[in-house]
Image (spheres, rainbow, N blue to C red):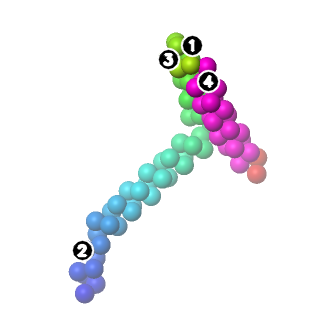
């Protein structure tokens, strides 16, 4: 009975494992100061090349600066 359960649940366990790994990568990416700084530089470059307007730049910059502030706050704890 347990063997049948294991066989039937294997695909679901695989999907859960993959989702957990993706979540770990996203959390790591969102907690890396260097990554956020790179995104800020890329955003500034897009703005300077007129790929995005000032409103979009300000909105996205604020989001990234908030994330960066949160990362630094977490490191101080």
The CA span between labels 3 and 4 is: 12 Å
**Element under disc 3:** loop
Task: Name the residue carrying label 1.
Answer: 48
| Residue farthest to the right, as pictured | 76
The CA span between labels 3 and 1 is: 8 Å
Q: Position of residue 48 (x, y in %)?
A: 57, 13
Asked if disc 3 and disc 1 are in contact, CB closer than 8 Å, the reply is no
Residue at 60% x, 44% y is 31
Choose between 58 and 48: the one closer to the eye. Answer: 58
Asked if disc 3 and disc 4 are in contact, CB closer than 8 Å, the reply is no
Asked if disc 2 and disc 4 are in contact, CB closer than 8 Å, the reply is no
Residue at 52% x, 12% y is 49
**Element under disc 4:** helix
Q: Relative to residue 62, is residue 49 depicted above or below?
A: above
Which-is-in-front pick, marks 2 and 4?
4
Task: Name the residue carrying label 4.
Answer: 55
Q: Relative to residue 34, is residue 50 depicted above or below?
A: above
Position of 50 with respect to 22 (left or right) is right
Label 4: few (<14), some (14–19) or many (≥20) C-alpha neighbours in 10 Å: few
Choose between 59 and 75: the one closer to the eye. Answer: 59
Task: Name the residue carrying label 3.
Answer: 51
Residue 2 occupies which quadrant of the picture? bottom left
The CA span between labels 2 and 4 is: 53 Å
Task: Name the residue carrying label 2.
Answer: 7
Residue 10 occupies which quadrant of the picture? bottom left
Q: Is residue 34 visible?
A: no
> Magenta stretch?
54-75
């Amino acid at each position: 009975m347990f063997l049948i359960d294991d066989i039937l649940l294997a695909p679901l366990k695989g999907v859960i494992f993959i989702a957990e790994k993706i979540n770990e990568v996203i959390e790591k990416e969102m907690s890396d100061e260097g990554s956020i700084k790179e995104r800020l530089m890329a955003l500034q470059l897009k703005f300077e090349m007129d790929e995005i307007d000032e409103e979009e730049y300000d909105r996205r910059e604020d989001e990234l600066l908030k994330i960066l502030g949160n990362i630094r706050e977490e490191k101080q704890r």
